[in-house]
């Protein structure tokens, strides 16, 4: 049971570089989302998707892009990395059974921007 | 707007002692409330959830939480702490379809 898979687990970038954090789930979940976790701030929603072809902004979307071309994949793109984007990023998905709020999380991607 | 406040960023208990992690919420609509646990270097996993059924909710690993509307609280308890309970715990409230608003987290330490 793979669940939610995130790659890479660790990444170091220089300011201004771009990269994509990958997220894939094999549970046929319609809902997928990206959170960032910072000390003392809990998790904050970056972007989310309620199905293939549909994305929307969360609480802290600036500096990030997403797309959802398939049900399985939901990549997060940083176009020009900034030190403020140093964080741990979590991808999560939820089954198509309504607003249950039960999210299944990946193991996280730790990003450092120098 | 919905929000969550977790009182105490760090809680330390002895093994076998009561665990009490505090969570207060603010919501303009009847809330769905959750507790998630994060073990070191892992993602979050659901401990328990309140979805307007029974006010006392039982979760995994012996944890339970009671929804108290009059106090806008959803505190997490466990009668007897175990070393394996050491982790970070997050309270959350729904902010729309499957969108969770998380508290800042409480790190639980359990010492022998």
Image (tube, coloured by chain):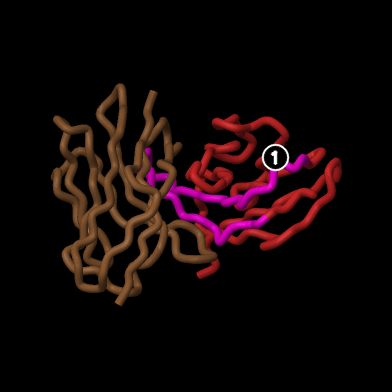
Asked if residue A105 is positioned above or below residue B62 in the image, the reply reads: above
Extreme-bottom residue of the structure: B112
Q: Which residue is pictured at 19% across the width and 51% down the height?
A: B57
**Rendering coords of residue B21 (x, y %):** 28, 51
Dot 1: what SS?
helix
Q: In the picture provided, is A63 more to the left or to the right than B27?
A: right
Q: Nearer the viewer, residue A79 or B53?
A: A79
Q: Is residue A18 left or right of residue A99?
A: right
Using the rendered view, name the quadrant where residue A53 is placed. top right
| Chain identifier, colour brown | B
Q: Give the quadrant of residue B13.
A: bottom left
Left or right: A24 with respect to B65? right
Q: Colour of chain A?
A: red
Compared with A33, B42 (above or below) is below
Q: Position of residue B76 (x, y in %)?
A: 24, 52
- Where residue A54 sits, quadrant-wise, is top right
Q: Does the magenta portion include A102?
A: yes
Q: Which residue shows up at 59% across the image and 30% down it?
A: A57
Question: In the visual, does A94 lie left or right of B46?
Answer: right
- The correct choice, above or below, for B64 with respect to A50 in the image is below
In the image, the segment drawn in magenta is A82-110
| Residue under label 1 | A84
Residue at 44% across / 59% down in the picture?
A: B38
Q: Chain of mark 1?
A: A
- Between B76 and A23, the residue placed more toward the observer is B76
Residue B103 percent across, percent down from the top left: 40, 41
Q: Is residue B10 magenta?
A: no
Residue A76: x percent and y percent?
A: 69, 45
Front one among A99 and A47:
A47
User: What count of labels does the image hold?
Assistant: 1
Q: In the displayed structure, would residue B95 be above or below residue B63?
A: above
């Amino acid at each position: 049971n793979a669940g939610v898979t995130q790659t890479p687990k660790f990444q170091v970038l220089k300011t201004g570089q771009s990269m994509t954090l990958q997220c894939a789930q094999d549970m046929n979940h319609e809902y997928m989302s990206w959170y960032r976790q910072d000390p003392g701030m809990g998790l904050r929603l970056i972007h989310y998707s309620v199905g293939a072809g549909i994305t929307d902004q969360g609480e802290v979307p600036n500096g990030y892009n997403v797309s959802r071309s398939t049900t399985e994949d939901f990549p997060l793109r940083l176009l020009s990395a900034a030190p403020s984007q140093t964080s741990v990023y979590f991808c999560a998905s939820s089954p198509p059974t309504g607003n249950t709020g039960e999210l299944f999380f990946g193991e996280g991607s730790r990003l450092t921007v120098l | 707007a919905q929000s969550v406040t977790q009182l105490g960023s760090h809680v330390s208990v002895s093994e076998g002692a009561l665990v009490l992690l505090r969570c207060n919420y603010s919501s303009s609509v009847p809330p769905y409330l959750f507790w998630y646990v994060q073990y070191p270097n892992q993602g979050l996993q659901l401990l328990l959830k309140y979805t307007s059924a029974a006010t006392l909710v039982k979760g995994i690993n012996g944890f339970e939480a009671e929804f108290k509307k009059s106090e806008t609280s959803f505190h997490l308890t466990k009668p007897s702490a175990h070393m394996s309970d050491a982790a970070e715990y997050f309270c959350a409230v729904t902010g729309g379809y499957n969108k969770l608003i998380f508290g800042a987290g409480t790190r639980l330490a359990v010492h022998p």
